[in-house]
Image (spheres, coloured by chain):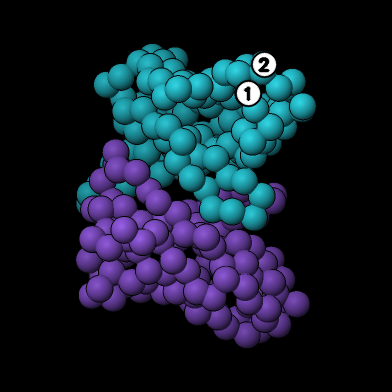
Amino acid sequence: KAGVTQTPRYLIKTRGQQVTLSCSPISGHRSVSWYQQTPGQGLQFLFEYFSETQRNKGNFPGRFSGRQFSNSRSEMNVSTLELGDSALYLCASSLKGGSQETQYFGPGTRLLVL
Amino acid sequence: GENVEQHPSTLSVQEGDSAVIKCTYSDSASNYFPWYKQELGKRPQLIIDIRSNVGEKKDQRIAVTLNKTAKHFSLHITETQPEDSAVYFCAASRWLPGSARQLTFGSGTQLTVLP
């Protein structure tokens, strides 16, 4: 099976702009989680989607949003970008999002906000 | 919520020596503990995991131990090789009300294996 894919791989934006990132899970996986990775804060959970519904959300401002489509692909959106949003954004998929399921990560989208 | 602490933050070992990374968690409801390896510029990849009904699991040179009473788990790498150099993350997972899963990561350990 093909692994988790993310597009684009790299993005450069300026403050105030918005950005949309895309994640395609492993075929058959219905749970998609998003993480922000920065050198200072490590891997921080953004949100998780299952069957087009957001089931869980981390401690991020409302500028961060997401959605999931019927084919399980997911997008996350960041509006009014700030310099501190520069990070590697990772998505991970699992079959149903069960607490003992393995999550498989995508390669990430590296976002640079200038 | 769950809090996962990971130590040490950096670890250097000589090739062939063993490396041990330790994590503690706060929520006794956590029932799944994966370890991920992330090489520079690459995605985190699962290297081993352990479920709460098991005390130890081994896969070739890698082993994980879990002490539920003390709420800590450890990664052991024996006969280290230069290609083991990477950042290692531990994580703890539990159910939330509403059937959602909470996966909390440790802060990571930069392992360097010196030739």
Residue located 66% across and 50% down the image: B40
Chain containing the residue with disc 2 = B
**Chain B rendered in what hue?**
cyan
Residue located 28% across and 76% down the image: A69
Mark 2 residue type: Asp
Chain containing the residue with disc 1 = B
Asked if residue A77 lies left or right of residue B11, the reply is left
Where, by quadrant of the figure, is residue B33 drawn? top left
Where, by quadrant of the figure, is residue A38 drawn? bottom right
Chain (purple): A
Q: Label 1's element? A: loop
Marks 2 and 1 in Cβ contact (< 8 Å): yes
Mark 1 residue type: Thr
Q: Label 2's element? A: loop
Name the spot of residue A85 as percent of width and height, x first. Answer: 64, 68
Q: Is residue A29 above or below residue B32?
A: below
Q: Circle 1 sits on which residue?
A: B80
Q: Circle 2 sits on which residue?
A: B17
Q: Is residue A47 above or below residue A43?
A: below
